Amino acid sequence: MRTSSFIPISIPIVAGMVLCPPTQAFTIFWQIMNQSYMAGLNIGNANEASGSQGNGQLMKAYCMATGTAISVACSLRLMTPYLLKGRTGGIAAFMNYFIGYSAVASSSAINVYAMRKNEIETGVSVKDEATGEDLGLSSEAAKQGIDKTIIARVIHNIPAFLVPAIWNLFLQRNGLMPKRMGPTRLTLELMGMAMGLYIAMPLNCALYP
């Protein structure tokens, strides 16, 4: 589910986070959009044998993750003027990517745990690798699976946000990035995001082959 939708869904979300005007309203909107996608993803990838959570539990988990994302992103957004101290250009753009990464990485960890903690309580189905025989439900296997998913989400977001930031700095330092937003600049920005996402997925898969 994640692999097939990763690039087409992630590019608009990342683009919205870093290209829209850095206002609190846009920050909140794009964090809600991202967490809505992540919530659906986590529900879809949950272990069926562990049973599903009720609507109340799912809404609570969604609100926890979304609240975390908004809190982190908005707090960093408020701190940005003090951190930048009037700096513009590449450094300011890099800060925009950093805010996006910090919010997404922290909330992704909470989102995974909140949406799938039911697996730890009930256990997930474990099968013998050689015979395929069902060995029953295991809470420990569920915990290990969720821990690995959280680590993978945090790590795979690094190139997704870092590569576009480095790409933009390179273009700006060499006078290749148009100063005003237009078709050329938008294309170059999206190219950087696509490169970051194409690097992120293989890296993510290689963590736990």
Image: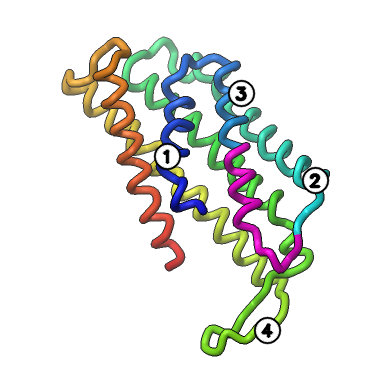
**Regarding mark 3 in the picture, which secondary structure is present there?**
helix
Q: Answer with left or right where residue 180 lies relative to residue 204.
A: left
Position of the C terminus, as image quadrant, is bottom left
Horizontal and vertical percent position of residue 70 = 63, 28
- Residue located at (56% from left, 57% from top): 149
Q: Mark 1 and mark 3 in contact (Cβ < 8 Å)?
A: no
Q: Neighbour class for label 3 at 10 Å: few (<14), some, many (≥20)?
A: some
Q: Which residue is labeled 3 in the image?
A: 28
Amino acid type at circle 4 is Leu
Q: Neighbour class for label 2 at 10 Å: few (<14), some, many (≥20)?
A: few
User: Which callout, 3 or 2, points to the residue nearer the camera?
Assistant: 2
Q: Which residue is labeled 2 in the image?
A: 55
**Regarding mark 1 in the picture, which secondary structure is present there?**
helix
Query: Does the magenta run of residues contain 42?
Result: yes
Q: Which mark is residue 135?
A: 4
* Separation of marks 2 and 1 at Cα, in angstroms: 28 Å
61 up-or-down from 98: above or below: below
Q: Quadrant of residue 103?
A: top right
Q: Which residue is labeled 1 in the image?
A: 8
Q: Nearer the viewer, residue 102 or 56?
A: 56
